Image (cartoon, grey):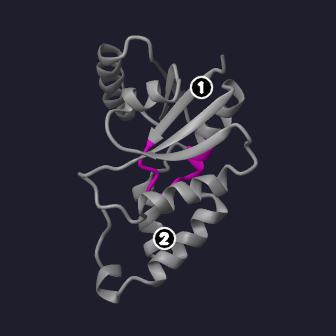
Amino acid sequence: MPNIAIYPGSFDPATNGHADVIARASRLFDRVIIAVGRNSQKQPLFSVEERVALLQETCQNMTNVTAEPFDGMLVDFARGNGAKVIIKGLRAVSDFEYEFQMALANRHLAPDVETLFLMTSAHHLYLSSSIVKEIARLNGDLTALVPDAVAVALRAKFALQPDELRSERLP
């Protein structure tokens, strides 16, 4: 039986921190499914389909990694895909507090599904999708922040934004 893990998130957009966690998880598990979620409380820059496509392009050299959209409860998605592990990437203690609560809730709902916390590499600790979007909006250098495909997509997305939207701060 293959050892399958789910790495969930909004990935709006995926950063090099996400890519770091994905690459490390791909070495630990037979199969890693990146679960790209819809978050009704956030206004995404990229559609779920765009985020899945960007992750697939980013991970094309990792043959055991796929990206899929998901909606609903994460533990149901994990069980439906035969996964016994949910991977959560952490940057700081503040991430841990929230993710720890989610892990306990998931354990209550699905005791057979474990949560594995992976710290991002030190040189990605400061990265977040929100910071990346702000840097992209201001036409900053994205080279060390996001995979190449994501940088191209961000440049295209912000080039298409009307001037009045470009002047607003992103969430």
131 part of magenta stretch = no
Residue drawn at the location 39% of the way across and 82% of the way down? 161
Q: Is residue 7 left or right of residue 72?
A: right
Give the label on residue 136, or none. Answer: 2
- Outermost residue on the bottom side: it is 163
- Based on the displayed image, in which of its 4 quarters is residue 44 positioned? bottom left
Q: Is residue 117 above or below residue 13?
A: above
Q: For the residues labelled 2 and 1, say whether their Cβ atoms are less than 8 Å apart.
A: no
- Outermost residue on the top side: it is 111
Name the spot of residue 70 as percent of width and height, x first. 41, 44
The secondary structure type at the circle numbered 2 is helix
Q: Is residue 141 visible?
A: no
Q: Which residue is mark 1?
A: 4
Label 2 – label 1 distance at C-alpha: 34 Å
How many discs mark residues in the rendered view?
Answer: 2
Q: Nearer the viewer, residue 45 or 37?
A: 37
| Region in magenta | 9-20
The secondary structure type at the circle numbered 1 is strand
Amino acid type, mark 2: Ala
